Image: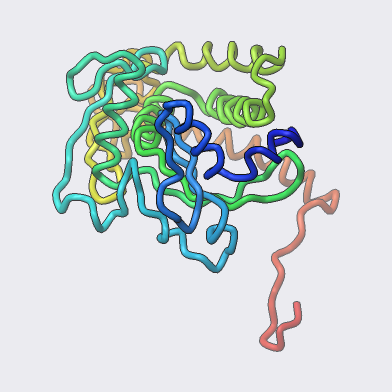
Amino acid sequence: WRDPALLQEFPGRKQMADYLMSKGIEASVGAKKRYSTDANLAGLSHEAEDLEFLTTSSRIVEPTMTCWPEDAPDSVEKVSVTFSEGFAHIINGKELSPLEMMREANRIGGRNGLGMSNAMENRVIGTKSRGVYEAPGMDLLGYALSQVYQTVLDKRSSDLFAQLSRFVSGQIYDGRYFDPSTRAALNAIDTLASRASGKVDISLYKGTAFIDSITEVPNSLYVEEFASMEADEGGQEGLDPSSAQGFVEVQRCEAIALAKAGHIQARRKIGTDGED
């Protein structure tokens, strides 16, 4: 699409399809649609033509990998996914290769209406592009994995993981996967993911996923005794509520300093006449 000679010979998709057909390669641009579609194993992107107008509903898209929620079954489907160091390797008791895992997740998520989204893409050249996306398998596996990460990562690690993930996704979008910074970020992600092992049971219903249980997490940071709002019984090492007083007093010092230095403003009062 950047070569003048190529553009002259193939000004559109129809000419490209005709050329392939003349060489014995089956190809078709299909029936005229109100948008164009690109596809891979992870999902579909629908864009261009009518979808370029923000007044056009995303629901003009006819889903291929998933379905609109109202077309999903009227019953809940149960699914379990087991992860090892951040990688899904068992779904509903079946151990699968990464390829088959994605295919199975696409099938399960798709028939339950997962993975439809509308997004405004920020292009490298500075413009925005509107697209409607289908990614049922990614939605299903990503949601399940996020529950494991929430269970095994502390607050600082969670914040770092989110920053690294966003950085890597931006690098890949910009075609910078092999940059040293990308490789370094991926190595850091591998470190954080090394403890992301566990089993997640989910209920799927009309485009929504609900957590049933998170089990078999050897590196879980969730301690029921610490999280309980009931009185500590049995001499377990739960949280002593009175210990919070010292924390409050430490925080108080900084708050007072900020207030004296004029960094904390009094709460504004909004009058009935609309003025502050």
The residue closer to the viewer here, 162 or 19, is 19
Image quarter in which the N terminus is found: top right
The residue closer to the viewer here, 152 or 241, is 152
Residue 59 at what x, y percent from top left? 41, 60
Applied colour scheme: rainbow
Residue 157 at what x, y percent from top left? 55, 23
- Residue at 27% across / 27% down in the picture? 104
The residue closer to the viewer here, 255 or 143, is 143
Residue 171 relative to residue 101: left or right: right
| Residue extending farthest left | 75
- Residue at 26% across / 34% down in the picture? 107
- Residue at 43% across / 31% down in the picture? 42
- Residue at 69% across / 74% down in the picture? 269
Compared to 179, does 32 lie above or below?
below
The residue closer to the viewer here, 3 or 126, is 3
Q: Quadrant of residue 55?
A: bottom right
Compared to 254, does 176 lie above or below?
above
| Residue extending farthest right | 261
| Residue extending farthest bottom | 273
Image quarter in which the C terminus is found: bottom right
Residue 196 at what x, y percent from top left? 40, 17
Q: How many marks?
A: 0
Residue 275 at what x, y percent from top left? 75, 81
Residue 53 relative to residue 105: left or right: right
Residue 268 relative to residue 172: left or right: right
